[in-house]
């Protein structure tokens, strides 16, 4: 029986892949030659026009690309430990990984949301969800560093997140998998009875960006997949697609694909705010962690929270509605005017476009087709604005160009389709290689899209680049959408698995970018503000090394008196006050990553010496012509030895002043050679 | 006094940076316009011409870029744990991180060496050094996976590694920092008396590539920095630059910069082999780890080794010599003919080029200027072929184009200089932005360079790209060197800190690239070769889940009977046998990374459930149109509960066969839409 069934699945997959690898030749031929090359080219010394922030998917991070060049400007570590710069390994950053399950070193980041003011990107912060162990992170776009991670309790697979409202009031975040609430040990086949979903409203402090779980709305046990919030006239409302309205718990590829229509949740969050004010919530004990980088000390701090506030739609009329959406919807997108909501049933041949006005009218007239768990189901016909007929196979996501056009990705037929939002007429289609998931247009989900480029993020790569063994990079494709027809300009490989991305004009971020940390403002308790203050202090088995780095030496660079069994904390302060002069620190045999310390910053590495001897440490970033000389030695004595703590930098300094001076003079002469 | 001294250093640094940020405008202007754009452009669907493998520096990894596009094709995890695909987190890969210090999750990778046959790249393997906790890794270029890591004992900072001989006989690997040998607890200021250096010869098995520490040569306590081996007539010889022949141990930037000349080591390793055969070595007890991926089971295995064989130059005449090299040399490079050896004193205004023939003659005639620790010092004048006069400031590294030209990077004056190897005449200079370290020409260190492109790897980035806060990507610059003058084509940011790189023609790797693992050859002890064999077995507190993945479900996808305190091992076998269809696995709250499992492969994730409830798991790679449905539930009961182990996939399969069938038929219809 199983094998019999498997044939179906195998057959299916085959079709998906066949469909997704179609007519490559005809498409690529159109983009050969100079003009596409020049469109994608950013000459040495020139800048890209846009930042594109892509979620890392199973990397757990975020990548920042330049558009149109497709160059990877930076990988920003968020949910996953990052040996490259010590994020998650340094004492200052470990707390970012705390959860109610303990320290979790990884997650699956899906949806990028840039902070908005009046429905436009303001370039202040970037939010992204952790899918597996539900969390939301905030990146500060002045520093490109993760500064906050908030766990979301009593949900599972926070896929439907963190969708932002037009003034960054809330990050709307729905559970992907329903679970018993609160968690309890029940048979899985009691799903329909015991499993529920929560839609979480996370508030964002307008001044500092700090996140707080404002309230949760308890919903039927569906899978909440994707969401958008209203804008303009629909501001104050949220729209969330769901699948598995069948409420099945096994083999969902078949069992959750039975109904011809699933349901889109429509939430009036202004109403919810009112109910919160009126105290219509119940409090529930739970546990979740809030991790915040202290801006003064630059040390992450964790707080366990133990209460959440829940709203029940049954007790809160006119707060939540459903609308039927054909079949197993995935994407849910709102156009720049706030009037049109696109619900894409990934197994439906057509696409349904809903009208906000009609939804409001239907609610007003109570034009309902029954209810689900006491939540009214708005009549499909009443809410529907129109249908895009047979646009392609496997519609997923839609973005907008601000000129009245929508662009939708089709996973199975491997294409991007351009259509007219008002008329629902199909205007253009271009193949993608292969099987696109999300797409992004700069500002394409805001009130004011910049409809110049479109990036399709493809799920299947196969033969698009030189092979790299079984594991291939995922692939992005850049289209010029400034004309009537989309034009493929560039293929570029990506890092991890980008799901959603958002792109923003460079001038909204570039002017505010921090070049280094002002050492005057360094309030780290173990900072060493000047080489004269360097020292080593023992407190039982704990040894604290107050160390500084400046081109081209670490101070102190000779240390004796460490003992086997000590916990040695190297607190390294980078004394530089210039752009792009990080210093690194590593010591042989540390069961730890390196430290990469930015100018003006202090970072701490824990070293537990395991055997006696003399061990080397050095700067890991090639910082200057004499970087290779930027090293030192740590002497480790046996446990219980009486070798005293001693440290120093060049006891023979005096007699070397002449050497330093000659060297300096020579460098001055030589500096002219390069001119 | 200290502050007084510091002014010198600060002043110095200032000069370095000033010098390194010179005349940008004039240089970029020359490369604007279409032709450079078209040279760097690789149209969608077309392939790059070369793979460039760059060391990740403080990322500990390797990155594979395409040239000329500068696109990042893949980051290959090597020395650092990699949550992105579970490397270092899965049970199969953990052992790769074992060292004599315990599990080390990070290192600092510097020098890429591709395997060679007859002095040319053969495209089989790639070797790279771990600088901090001395190790050498091997990557299999059929799969782009790290398959072997060998620790090197009794050295510190394995910077001078792993330089390969022309038939991959050895990886020559010298210590960067000298230490007491064997390690002991001695005062650091006994450096001159107690600290020694080791040069390690690691043999490579010609069939399987397996590494073995063949022998170590005990050397004076210098810092061994970089090396090259002879080729052609000089095959059988190694050349290694050293600094700190002053044998200082503190403030090296000054104290190791005093002597006007340091020493280059010249080693006759054929002679060393002969001494080994004659048993002229001493054995020393030590400890180091050899970690090897078992190709049959695909599980990494560790072995601790406890003996090394040491050759002492005093006991082995005619094996080791020194040659004086002006001041604090860094790069050491041998031209394609094997005749010319370039020793770059990074603080010297000129560059010394040595002649292999003259070195042989000097040895024959015993034309020595004394000795150091019993090692003869060959007369500088006798070994010198000629001097490149005032080429620039801060010469670092040299590669060759196979047309008689050499290309050298200058860190301080920020430029690449082209010069004629025979005449030492300077032919061209181009600015780089900013401060280049290594450079790479495809095959540029082999007998047969492909002198079409040159990539400069710059250490300072500053304003070259859109800013990303204080932490910036390092930067590479691609030059066309096919003409008389070098032409800057492209700037591209890089990952980590690339030190050295090697580039190889795509056709030497592409045809052999493995697309997926043949499941017939899967000998993993916990593999599940077919859905019918899926099961769950308890052994005390250990639970083993034999799980399979195929589009679009995990089997089993409902599991009950886990208990708090269990050690649950999910052994996931990917049943796909198609290219680019990995499946992932993650479960909520695991204090672990994901698994990313290639087709035909088995990978294992350890999960220790911490509280009762029902927890979701899912596929982390968007594998198909119904990926979102590829999920399941694990029920966890309290410790000591008597809930029995139960598992399944869709008990209601029968009644759903009709649904599956209808779904399949519909998909077939729809598949035509995309055509």
Image: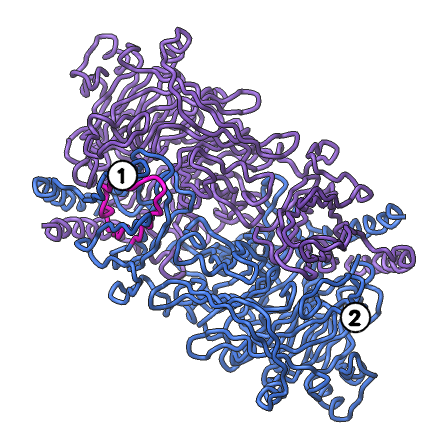
Chain colours: A blue, B purple
Q: In the drawing, does residue B72 fall left or right of residue A387?
A: left
- B616, above or below A382, in the image: above
The residue singled out by tag 1 in the image is: A633
Most extreme residue toward the top is B278
Residue B346, position in %: x, y? Answer: 24, 36
Name the quadrant containing residue A317.
bottom right
- A671, above or below B192, in the image: below
Question: Label 2 is found on which chain of the structure?
Answer: A
Asked whether the residues under marks 2 and 1 belong to the same chain, the reply is: yes
- Of B10 and B182, which appears nearest the observer? B182
Name the quadrant containing residue B487.
top left
Please report the residue visible at 66 percent of the width from the left and 73 percent of the height from the top: A198
Range drawn in magenta: A545-572
| Eye-nearest disc, 2 or 1 | 2
Q: Does the magenta portion include B275? A: no
The residue singled out by tag 2 in the image is: A193
Q: Alpha carbon of mark 2 to alpha carbon of mark 1: how far?
A: 65 Å
Q: In the drawing, does residue A238 fall left or right of residue A210?
A: right
**Image mark for residue B163:** none
């Amino acid at each position: 029986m199983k094998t019999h069934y498997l044939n179906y699945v195998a057959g299916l997959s085959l079709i998906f892949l066949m469909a997704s690898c179609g007519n490559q030749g005809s498409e690529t031929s159109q983009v050969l030659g100079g003009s596409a090359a020049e469109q994608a080219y950013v000459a040495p010394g020139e800048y890209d026009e846009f930042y594109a922030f892509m979620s890392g998917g199973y990397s757990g991070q975020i990548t920042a690309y330049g558009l149109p060049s497709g160059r990877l400007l930076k990988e920003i570590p968020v949910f996953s430990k990052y040996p490259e710069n010590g994020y998650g390994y340094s004492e200052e950053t470990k707390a970012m990984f705390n959860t109610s399950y303990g320290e979790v070193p990884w997650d699956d980041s899906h949806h990028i949301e840039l902070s908005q003011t009046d429905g436009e990107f303001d370039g202040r912060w970037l939010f992204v969800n952790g899918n597996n162990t539900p969390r939301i992170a905030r990146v500060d776009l002045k520093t490109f560093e993760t500064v906050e991670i908030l766990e979301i309790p009593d949900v599972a697979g926070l896929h439907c997140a963190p969708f932002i409202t037009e003034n960054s009031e809330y990050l709307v975040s729905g559970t992907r998998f329903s679970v018993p609430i609160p968690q309890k040990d029940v048979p899985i086949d009691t799903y329909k009875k015991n499993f529920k979903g929560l839609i979480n409203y996370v508030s964002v402090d307008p001044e500092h960006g700090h996140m707080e779980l404002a309230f949760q709305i308890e919903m039927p046990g569906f899978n909440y997949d994707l969401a958008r919030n209203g804008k303009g006239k629909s501001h104050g409302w949220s729209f969330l697609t769901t699948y598995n309205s069948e409420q099945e718990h096994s083999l969902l590829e078949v069992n959750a694909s039975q109904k011809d229509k699933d349901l889109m949740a429509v939430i009036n969050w202004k109403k919810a705010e009112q109910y919160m004010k009126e105290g219509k919530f119940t409090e529930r004990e739970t546990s979740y962690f809030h991790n915040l980088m202290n801006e003064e000390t630059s040390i992450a701090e964790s707080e366990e929270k133990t209460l959440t506030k829940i709203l029940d739609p049954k007790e809160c009329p006119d707060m939540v509605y459903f609308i039927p959406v054909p079949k197993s919807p995935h994407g849910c997108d709102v156009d720049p005017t706030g009037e049109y909501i696109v619900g894409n049933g990934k197994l439906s041949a057509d696409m349904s476009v809903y009208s906000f006005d009609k939804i409001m009218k239907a609610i007003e007239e109570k034009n309902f087709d029954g209810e689900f768990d006491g939540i009214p189901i708005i009549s499909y016909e009443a809410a529907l604005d129109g249908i895009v007929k047979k646009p392609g196979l496997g519609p997923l996501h839609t973005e907008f160009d601000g000129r009245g056009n929508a662009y939708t990705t089709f996973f199975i037929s491997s294409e991007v389709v351009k259509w007219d939002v008002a008329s629902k007429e199909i205007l253009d289609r271009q193949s993608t290689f292969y099987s696109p998931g999300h797409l992004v247009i700069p500002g394409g989900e805001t009130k004011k899209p910049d409809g110049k480029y479109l990036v399709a993020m493809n799920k299947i790569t196969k033969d698009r680049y030189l092979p790299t063994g079984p594991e291939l990079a995922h692939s992005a494709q850049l289209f010029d959408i400034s004309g009537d027809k989309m034009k493929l300009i560039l293929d570029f490989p990506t890092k991890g698995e980008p799901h959603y991305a958002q792109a923003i004009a460079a001038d909204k971020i570039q002017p505010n970018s921090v070049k280094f940390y002002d050492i005057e403002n360094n309030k780290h308790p173990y900072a060493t503000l000047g080489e004269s203050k360097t020292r080593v202090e023992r407190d039982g088995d704990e040894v604290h090394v107050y160390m500084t780095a400046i081109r081209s030496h670490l101070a102190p660079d000779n240390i004796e008196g460490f003992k086997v069994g000590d916990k040695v904390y190297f607190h390294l302060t980078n004394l530089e006050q210039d752009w792009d002069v990080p210093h690194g620190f590593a010591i042989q045999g540390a069961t730890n990553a390196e430290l990469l310390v930015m100018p003006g910053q202090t970072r701490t590495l824990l070293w537990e010496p395991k055997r006696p001897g003399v061990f080397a440490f050095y700067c890991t970033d090639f910082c200057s012509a004499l970087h290779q000389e930027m090293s030192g030695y740590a002497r480790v004595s046996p446990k219980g030895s009486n070798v005293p703590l001693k440290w120093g930098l060049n006891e023979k300094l005096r007699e070397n002043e002449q050497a330093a001076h000659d060297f300096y003079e020579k460098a001055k002469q030589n500096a002219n050679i390069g001119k």
